[in-house]
Amino acid sequence: MRKKQGILIIADGLGDRPIRKLDNKTPLEYAKTPNLDFLASRGMCGNVYPYEPGVRVGTDVGHLLIFGYDPKKVYSGRGPIEAYSGGLELLPGDIAFRGNFATVDDTFKVIDRRAQRITKGTKELAEAINGLKLDDGTTVLVKELTAHRAAIVLRGENLSANITTTDPGTAEEGKNLVRPEPLDDSEASKRTAELLWELTNKIYSILSSHSINKEREKEDKLPANMIIVRGPGKKPSMHTISEQYDLKCGCVAGDLTIHGIAKMTGMDSFMSSSFTGGFDTDVLGKARMGIKLLKEGYDWVVIHVKAPDLAGHDNLPDKKVESAEKIDGLIGLLIDNLDLDNCYISFTADHSTPCEVRDHTGDPVPTIISGGDVRKDGISQAGESYFSKGSLHNLTANDIFMLQMDLMGFTKKYGA
Amino acid sequence: MRKKQGILIIADGLGDRPIRKLDNKTPLEYAKTPNLDFLASRGMCGNVYPYEPGVRVGTDVGHLLIFGYDPKKVYSGRGPIEAYSGGLELLPGDIAFRGNFATVDDTFKVIDRRAQRITKGTKELAEAINGLKLDDGTTVLVKELTAHRAAIVLRGENLSANITTTDPGTAEEGKNLVRPEPLDDSEASKRTAELLWELTNKIYSILSSHSINKEREKEDKLPANMIIVRGPGKKPSMHTISEQYDLKCGCVAGDLTIHGIAKMTGMDSFMSSSFTGGFDTDVLGKARMGIKLLKEGYDWVVIHVKAPDLAGHDNLPDKKVESAEKIDGLIGLLIDNLDLDNCYISFTADHSTPCEVRDHTGDPVPTIISGGDVRKDGISQAGESYFSKGSLHNLTANDIFMLQMDLMGFTKKYGA
């Protein structure tokens, strides 16, 4: 079967709705995007549902869908992804959580769920707990992530992810940590809930007396004396993309969570200090790295840009327009440096984050598959309202993955 | 319920992509097709996925989908279809293979996997093995098919299709036949793998000394002293179309595999010596036979034309244009001779075979459902890019089958 390369740009949370101050256009429609318009005119377009119409997904599930997975089969919580993003190798049976370094008082009332967004010293704090043995021999692994975040893993026999956690709720200061409860009648769930509470007490005891926190108190900072955990999950049983389709995949991203998903799905993931995961990220640097990976022989390269999602959550339409235009510049660099006859260029988002909603919604996401021999559908302008007339309209993220694999020549024939 | 007749034309592998030398049109778009344009203007159009977006299917699976079946439930390999195409009646438990008469040396190295595309004497060679009893009493059935091809059936107790076969790979001369292996731990799979190897040895022994091969050697031809087998499968447990929808179906085709699928799905199948399965097939003869069957009272008639697929595999865009125009002539004869108020005319393909890819792809296939009271969708030209705006766009082959059954009045009401 003839093989070609492909590159996919994921504009996180880009999908939006008409906004009054943008002349009732969406940010993508309002933005000047000559390169995306070019891609649209040479390919297939549509608004694509991440999962099913009206179902809103998180960044993690959205990316698993873009990478061709059924989240019902491989997603059991954010914990495992954060473990991968921190470089922790999960074993079957491990229970992984995502966590925040936080400040609590001695009754476990939450004073600051992010310990004043602590950035320094978390490595030492994580190391103080990493390797801890609980009373029954269960091992605790901890790895600091970006800012106040951390990954926590329980490694032992007969553990369960089907429990509630200590988290009293996001952005809820003043409430007490919650004693974990099993969510089913199994011995494993009862035991794991108790182990998590034992761990919570031990974390408080270890971190309260840690020198990093003594320093912080001297500087009138709140101590990071707790890790609040949530999102328990097990290592999923899944094939990597490379195993399933026999191709080499690379992922270029600034956001650690995306690196976690990339590692979990077997992609090689690439980072640079100029990829910040913020508005100031080096989009052209990402394009250059993507081009380099293709030249080095990667079959499929994915480039992720977080900025549009941040603008959506903060209701900053102008920033969202600006990030769409920056991404258009990234696309321009790809068009200038890649041979469209040998490399398909695709574009999508993991979900919509409409500015006025300030959260992920189930709206379908603007999507293009473009390149040499792709069928054209007559759309020549990038934007949600134009794409509703496109040939990919109402397909799903999984469909778009399969269409790319098929164009590139990596699918197996069903039948003979 | 009011009943009407229907006829469906299947242009095998017709779907394609824009081709430079055809002014960036697909062969169907480039071809002059006044009759298909007429059908389009009086019906519903769309590019339809054979199975799911991006999934490429073989001719066998593609036709099962067009005939309304779920291949996951009824398809277990090409073997059973070839057995049906040769007129072998499968019993539950039989394992059927497709096979090639081939030339091997005494170490079972493949000298020519088609025995110089042998055409004469295969009936006698098949008869020499047909009815053979293996050591444990398992019976072997063999029936010659077109040219070097044959169907092989193992009939006995506790057999399994979950084995590898003797085939070292298509188009691979110089390799040795492979000793079959079970693909699971069952006794049945282990036994069947051994039986197939026993059969392979017996075939060599019987055919090597056969008079047909002695003749061939005298004429300096390679002996057809082996049958290489592949595609093992069991008789599927399935209802015929007639049983499910209480209608009488006929299939007109030149290709034996299509006859096999037709018989397996309970259609009466019709052949004529002028239906060659090649570029020179008698398309107008097929139209006349279809019209005759409808006049005789068949409710649903299917006409299959193989030529576009051959042009796709051989990257012959002009030939594909020519075959589309010939099929347009076939459609013209139908339009002239059928009352569109009483007989729907539909048009589709089993899969796309883009010339430049030279293989089946997962691209959706151009499809029309036309006739008296069918809703119109404003499309008046036949072609993949026009059809992306049609009302059937992004449906599946199973959907198109159900729409035809419903228009014709053969579906049951769900609810009351």
Image (cartoon, coloured by chain):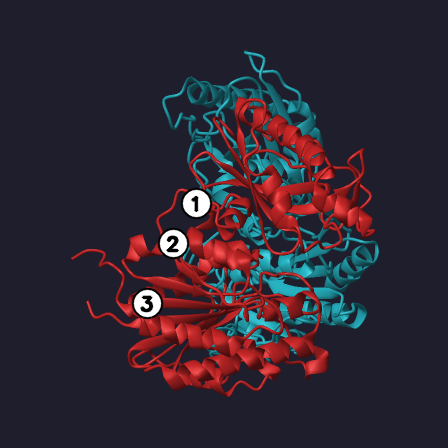
Chain colours: A cyan, B red
Q: Residue at x 54, y 35 (%)?
A: B131
Query: Could you tell me the amino acid type at mark 2?
Result: Gly
| Disc 3 to disc 2: CB gap under 8 Å | no
Disc 3 versus disc 2: distance between alpha carbons?
13 Å
Disc 3 versus disc 1: distance between alpha carbons?
27 Å
The numbered mark at residue B73 is: 1
Query: Could you tell me the amino acid type at mark 1?
Result: Lys
The earlier-in-sequence mark between 1 and 2 is: 1
Q: Quadrant of the C terminus of chain B?
A: bottom left
Q: How many marks?
A: 3
Q: Is residue B334 above or below residue B366?
A: below
The earlier-in-sequence mark between 3 and 2 is: 2
Disc 1 versus disc 2: distance between alpha carbons?
16 Å
Neighbour tally class for label 3: few under 14, some 14-19, many 20 plus, Cα within 10 Å: some
* Viewer-proximal residue among A318 and B217: B217
From the image, tell me which residue sits under label 2. Answer: B266
The numbered mark at residue B298 is: 3
Residue B379 spot, x, y in % from top left: 45, 83
Q: Secondary structure at mark 3?
A: loop
Q: Secondary structure at mark 2?
A: loop
Q: In the image, is B359 to the left or to the right of B305? A: right
Could you say which quadrant of the image residue B73 lies in? top left
